Image (cartoon, helix red, strand yellow):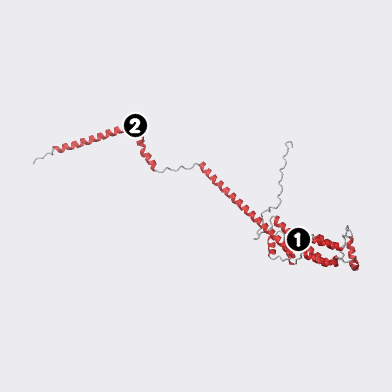
Amino acid sequence: MQDIPPPADSTTSRGRSAGMTLFVALIAFVIGAVLVGWLAIRGYLPAVLNAPATMTQAIAPAPQPSPAPAAQMSQIATVEGRLAMIEDRISRIDFQTDAAAGNAGRAEGLLIAFAARRMVDRGEPLGYVADQLRLRFMNAQPRAVQTVVDFAANPVTIDALSARLEALSPELTVTDAKLSLWDRARHEIGSLFVVRHDSAALANPAARIERARLMLTARRIDSAVGEVQRLPGAEAADTWIIDARRYEAVQKALDLLETAAMLEPNRLQDSTGRSVDQPSPLAPTPPAEEPAPEASEGA
């Protein structure tokens, strides 16, 4: 059996396909080379070559630059400055609050002292005012507080003293003839130690009693007591003199309490029992110390 040779057309077709492929590749290479040369001539080739890197940078988020150390220190200094200002304002607010509380405590204490004076002058019991006096002033003026409280337990008024002086007038103006020998002798001995510069009219017992009434009205208790003590029958007014002295003492005690409410530096207390440490706005300020004179060069 003889071999049958392949058809000639099949071999020819393959050769033609290979040639066509080579031709197309050559044409594509030529066209690419021409395109690259044209881009290079026009100056577009660097832009085309860098386009992928530019697109990558555009897609990727740009990193945030870290602040410089100087900028960080500036920001820290600014924050610390603001915190210092806030702390300063808070301290000022605290100081103003303490000052307002201290002044309020002083004002309340002064009102309590005024209320106590009104009740004393009227001869009324102190009631709750006594408790307030003890709470606010016992550390600052204990003796004055006790004097006011004791007086209020057995009060006496100016009107009562005037009425009692009027009732004692007959006994106080008794003449020496009506006195016993002992009373006359005591009166004479007492007169030896009194320097009298009054005229006869001023030394008259009736005139002395009238002056004593005027002194009581003016609340000059010590002067009123002095006039009564010079009367011939002064021993009849011993109880009256004691009560007048008590009234004088309570007035001085009330003066001390009012002064403490205004000027006491650290022992006054408020309604809660806390010390009023805020200096009084009425307190005198100490004079500023003058700088020492500088020594001369020759010294």
Residue in the image at 89% along x and 61% along y? 191
Dividing the picture into quadrants, the one containing residue 41 is: top left
For label 2, the SS is helix
Identify the mark nearer the N-term, 1 or 2. 2
Of 278 and 46, which appears nearest the observer? 278
Would you name the residue on which mark 1 appears? 251
Dot label at residue 200: none
Say which amino acid is labelled 2. Arg
Look at discs 1 and 2 and give the one toward the viewer: 1
The x and y percentages for residue 31 are 27, 33
203 and 276: which is toward the camera? 203
x 14%, y 37%: residue: 9
Q: Is residue 138 visible?
A: no
Question: Where is 18 relative to 247, above or below?
Answer: above
Q: Is residue 228 left or right of residue 90?
A: right
Q: Is residue 22 above or below residue 95?
A: above
Disc marking residue 42:
2
The quadrant of the rendering that contains the N terminus is top left
